[in-house]
Amino acid sequence: MSEKIYDVPAEWAKRAFVDDAKYREMYERSVKDPTGFWGEHGKRLDWIKPYTIVENTSYAPGNISIKWFEDGELNAAWNCIDRHLETRGDQVAIIWEGDDPSESRKITYRELHDEVCKMANVLRNRNVKKGDRVTIYLPMIPEAAFAMLACARIGAIHSVVFGGFSPDSLAQRITDCQSKVVITADEGLRGGRRVPLKANVDAALRKVGGVDWVVVVKRTGADVFMDDVRDFWYHEAAEMVTTDCPCEPMNAEDPLFILYTSGSTGQPKGVLHTTGGYLVFASMTHQYIFDYHDGDVYWCTADVGWVTGHSYILYGPLANGATTLMFEGVPSYPSNSRFWEVIDKHQVNIFYTAPTAIRALMQSGDEPVKKTSRKSLRLLGSVGEPINPEAWEWYYHVVGDNRCPIVDTWWQTETGGILITPLPGATKLKPGSATRPFFGVVPQILDADANVLEGECTGNLCLARSWPGQMRTVYGDHARFEQTYFSAYPGKYFTGDGCRRDADGFYWITGRVDDVINVSGHRMGTAEVESSLVAHPKVSEAAVVGYPHDIKGQGIYAYVTLMTGVDATEELRKELVAWVRKDIGPIASPDLIQFAPSLPKTRSGKIMRRILRKIAEDEPSTLGDTSTLADPGVVDELVAHRQNKR
Ligand code: PRX
């Protein structure tokens, strides 16, 4: 691992909100006196009824309960819009950059207010009330932001489903939270290609009923099926309503949104975030970590279908009165210079993207970057997976012209906001390290026997205490919440990540230690891909693991045992990839499939994934002990036919 160090530039230490001394002082206070610290920083929001209780949290086994600011009342849309109107009504809130470079739009805070109120009134007119669930399945168009904020305004709980998920995945997420309404578009547009969103919704709703309304935003103008009773066009409904809609007063612990994410077992879980703590944390992290100052143009390239889009395109930046850029397209369309052209076009100062995008762009060399100016850039960010030092250095030297600090931000859907990260005016940088904890965050590294390790060490990453942005429960299944996050190490939140702490106390995330794989920064449960594969009539058994992939970080490697008499052909391999793609969505497509006459199992029938992982990683010499296998001969056959031979 690289141990190269980049010191904090003097001008950064001076201009940033926090320098090293201030970081240490604030951090110490945040962990010694969390009530005082968060009590003070909670005031960054407008409260309808101020809180008197700051923290009421328990990680005690059998009694996991997380509440922040629990007697306060506020509204997230008010905090993201209305409170800015007096001072920055004419400031641009959202810059929208279309898939086609000729299309862009600027939406001021006043316009945002009017659009959100219209959407909120359309929903209210259909009897959507506080606590109701609304599924949002939209492309990256301004209406996605309007829809999320409209829900927040009337107290409905949004569940955004990434537009790349299949009808089945969408159906399952609609059913799990019993949404009454789905908001979608005729089609999405990405890299010049159309995504049939409305047709996917129709297919999903043919499987699951229970939805009263489908609101359809016109994006491409495609001719789509419209159910006479259930479906209506948003632009027509919006003409009938006013731009006035009061904000519903919400308790700090009332749910703001549900976001589904993959775990190591079973179906994706509905991660529930509530209103007060989440918004305090999202806005505070956005301000300090990206050193956001008034007037800055900030761009996070994530999709609003992921948590990064929730916290760092929408809620954090807008709560801070920022100008946030929303991009409909992809980094490679119309050319590999697109990101950098957008930066020049809108004079972006802060740019936040994922290592997978950096690695993909790095492959086409420096020229597509160097032909753009990027002079406006001041700070770069990375999120979603470990960034390899080579990609970090390229990002720093080529994209940032050796001028812009990189904040490598570690966090999760569950954490609501960034937990481990450099602060640009305070923290020296080591390529590949997420460096130090944010305020209020107490990381611990534990060994397999639950011993807390001190000093330099490697082990499993836990968090010893709560922070305001923490998820509160798995929607509808609190037992699963306790089991997933608090049972491995009782009394602590277990992240599922492995981690190393170096001599400086810097943290290096090494990747998931559970059966979750991180493909291009997107989480995928191996169990989900396996159950999709075994649902195919020709498959009898499947085991899925991750393996190192040059661009995606991790690729999906599937071992498949076929039904007796079925031939293992190239055609079937393609068919299985297409099957999973259709069943879950393109992000779940296996990269490599190995047909396996049988899988390595213990005598009790448990598949030995450790061995499968080693074979997929092309490390057959380090398989370890295989003597406990029911039939050790299976391994030789798998090694001989491995798909990832270097
Ligand atoms: O393994 C870690 C990895 O992404 C996981 C969380 O995925 P998700 O909930 O989809 O959220 C992604 C965006 C916050 C983590 O458990 N991860 C995320 N950021 C980093 C990271 N791994 C290393 N370095 C990071 N900066």
Image (spheres, rainbow, N blue to C red):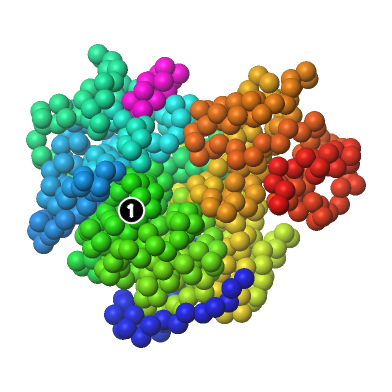
Q: Amino acid at mark 1?
A: Arg
- Please state the horizontal and vertical placement of residue 35, each as a whole percent of the image: 40, 67
Regarding residue 501, the answer to whether it shows in the image is yes
Callout 1 secondary element: helix
Which residue corresponds to the image point at 48% horizontal and 54% vertical from the top-left?
360
Indicate whether 231 appears above or below 118: above
**Within-10-Å neighbours for mark 1: few <14, some 14–19, many 20+:** many
Judging depth in this view, the residue of 54 and 198 nearest the camera is 198
Indicate whether 536 appears above or below 328: above
Which residue corresponds to the image point at 33% horizontal and 46% vertical from the top-left?
334
- Please state the horizontal and vertical placement of residue 244, each as a whole percent of the image: 10, 40
- For residue 171: magenta? no
- Please state the horizontal and vertical placement of residue 587, each as a whole percent of the image: 50, 39
Which residue corresponds to the image point at 73% horizontal and 60% vertical from the top-left?
449
Judging depth in this view, the residue of 535 and 224 nearest the camera is 224
Quadrant housing the N terminus? bottom right
**Which SS does the magenta portion mostly show?**
helix
Q: Is mark 1 within 8 Å of ligand 1?
A: no
Judging depth in this view, the residue of 38 and 518 nearest the camera is 518
Reading the image, the residue beneath label 1 is: 338
Indicate whether 236 appears above or below 557: above
- Please state the horizontal and vertical placement of residue 195, each as a whole percent of the image: 36, 32
Which residue corresponds to the image point at 71% horizontal and 52% vertical from the top-left?
646
Left or right of 21 in this view: 217: left
Judging depth in this view, the residue of 628 and 3 nearest the camera is 3
Residue stretch rendered in magenta on the structure: 196-210
Left or right of 572 in this view: 467: left
- For residue 197: magenta? yes
Q: Quadrant of residue 340?
A: bottom left
